[in-house]
Image: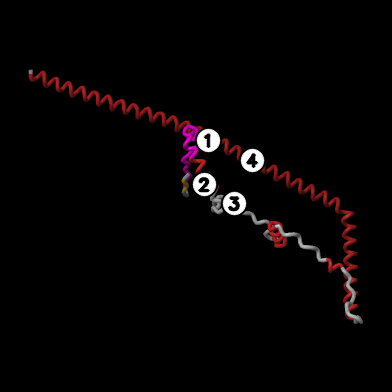
Amino acid sequence: MSTNSDQVLFDSLPYYDDDLQKYPELRQKVDQELTREQQKGSTDVPHPRLSPPVTLFADNPLLQAEMKRIAAGQPFPALDKTRYTLPEPSSTPSNPEEWKVALDNAYAQLQHQKIRQNNLTLLQTYGANAWRIQNYLLEQNAKNIEKSLEELKELTVEVNRERKNEQDRIGKQLTSLETRWTELISGVLQIEMANVALESQIDQLNKREVELSQL
């Protein structure tokens, strides 16, 4: 296929051409070429008409880092349990400042547990419905995507069907024109052979006329 800014010219009709069936040696060459192309690997430049690669979570560095961790097969980092402990002052005898730090930590842990208990209460009260709504939305999105996929498949089938019909029509025209061209060439050759035969007969008649005039 050759292209320019104004037109697209197709030099083959894959739905109509049957050269591979007529000439088995062509099939062998095609298979060799396909094998050679496949051995090049994935270093080839993608076709310019292909969509650019999709970058997942482009606006979320944390999820991007998590995707890279999963792709690298690295284990999930262990939870830091030190933040949930209540260490007492380590110095003996302890001073008031260390006890104040330990007490502030205990208050923070207590507040964290209260917030956690409130969150669990809210989750038990509204979590089931929120989960159902989220599942419903996901199911609707999945159905919409499946519907779009089916429409795209039908459109692809329709495009291929139209392309096949168009190539069959053009192929039959080409075959008819090729047959007509062959007939015309054959007619021209027959006319040329007849002209040569007539010229030979004329030469013989002229020679005969000369012989008769001499007598």
Secondary structure at badge 2 equals helix
Q: CA distance from mark 3 to mark 1?
A: 26 Å
Q: Nearer the viewer, mark 3 or mark 2?
A: 2
The residue beneath circle 4 is 153
Secondary structure at badge 3 equals loop
Report the magenta residues as a range.
6-28
Residue 170 visible in this rendered orientation of the protein: no
The residue beneath circle 3 is 51
The picture places residue 47, in percent across and down from the top left corner, at 54, 50
Amino acid type assigned to the residue bearing label 2 in the image: Arg
Is residue 19 in the magenta section?
yes
Q: CA distance from mark 4 to mark 3?
A: 18 Å
Disc 2 to disc 1: CB gap under 8 Å: no
Q: Residues within 10 Å of mark 3 (few under 14, many from 20)?
A: few
Q: Is 49 situated above or below 120?
A: above
Q: Residues within 10 Å of mark 1 (few under 14, many from 20)?
A: some
The picture places residue 138, in percent across and down from the top left corner, at 76, 48
Disc 3 to disc 2: CB gap under 8 Å: no
Mark 3 or mark 1: whose residue is earlier in sequence: 1
Specify the label residue 15 is tagged with. 1
